[in-house]
Amino acid sequence: MKSEVFRFLYYLFLLSAVSTFVSEFHTRDKTYLFADSGITEVKSSQKDFFTSYSDFWNRILFESGGLTQNGELVYRHIGSRFFATLHLAIFSILFGSFLAFSLSLLVIYLKSDSLYKFVFFIANFILSTPIFIFAILLLLIFFYKLEWFPPGGYESGNIYYVVLPGVALGSRIFARLALYLLPEVKRESKSKYVQLLITRSYPWSHIVRIEIFLKVLPVTLILLVLDFGSLLSGAMVVEEIFFFPGIGKSLYYSIKSMDTYLLSTLLMYSGILFYILNRIGFYLQKYFSGEYQNAP
């Protein structure tokens, strides 16, 4: 426990230093913002790194992150966007994992090599296609042609607004999980344990739905935890395309507008989130490994 605390503090120190450096370096030269005004020289009040680092921690601890360029408290701004991003992340995880598990188990249940190759191809195709292309196709089909879903925006708790961006993000989760699950469930279906269950006249549907599913579930949970961390940190491209007011759009805005306070705080937020969920994934892996090692 003590080593974990020191690990986190060491990581926090490095993360805060990087967040400060990146945000200050990014906003060092704002001359191009005045390119159309005829102004050739812009006065800069650039501070040294240690002063910026001290100011950063003062804002984080005592000033609610400081103020954005719009005059809003940084913490309040992030808080107002967090639940929209959480809603989108949960939908994406559920959609992607449900589709990956369903198709992978269906392939084994039907014992179909052609379906296996088809799902494997689709998963590879999705991962090799830029996500913005997939997002635009969803808009063209489900908004422009069918008029089923809105092109963007968000209302608190309304799943109607997260379907299109959620499917766009969830498709990547489906593809990554499918590429892991397909060979795993196929290997499990040929294991000695499954062959033993077959000789004991267990129904094939029970073997697929329960035994094989439970065998591949632990590692899949770890992969989902890691994906969840990336989604909670925001998806800039998807959120920008669908005008979704989430963390990713705020990060894009802070980079575009050179909002130092918002950018540094979002980098800190994303880093801490990644760390926590990665450590959860690490301990889940240790737990499941120990569980199987101790199993009779």
Image: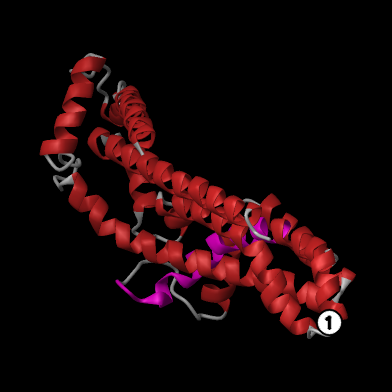
Question: Could you tell me residue 246's position as x and y percent?
Answer: 35, 56
Q: Residue furthest front?
A: 296
Q: Is residue 166 visible?
A: no
Question: Could you tell me residue 257's position as x and y percent?
Answer: 30, 38
In the rendered structure, does residue 163 fall within the stretch colored magenta?
yes
The image quadrant of residue 10 is top left
| Foreground pick, 255 / 6 | 6
Identify the residue under disc 1.
Answer: 200
Image quadrant in which the N terminus is located = top left
Q: Residue at x 20, y 45 (%)?
A: 74
Q: For the residue marked with disc 1, what is the amino acid?
A: Arg
**Magenta span: helix, strand or loop, mainly?**
helix
Number of numbered tags placed on the structure image:
1
In the rendered structure, does residue 18 fall within the stretch colored magenta?
no
The image quadrant of residue 184 is bottom right
Residue 198 left/right relative to 257: right
Q: Secondary structure at mark 1?
A: loop
- Give the extent of the magenta segment: 156-179
| Foreground pick, 108 / 48 | 108
Q: Residue furthest top?
A: 48
| Foreground pick, 237 / 19 | 19
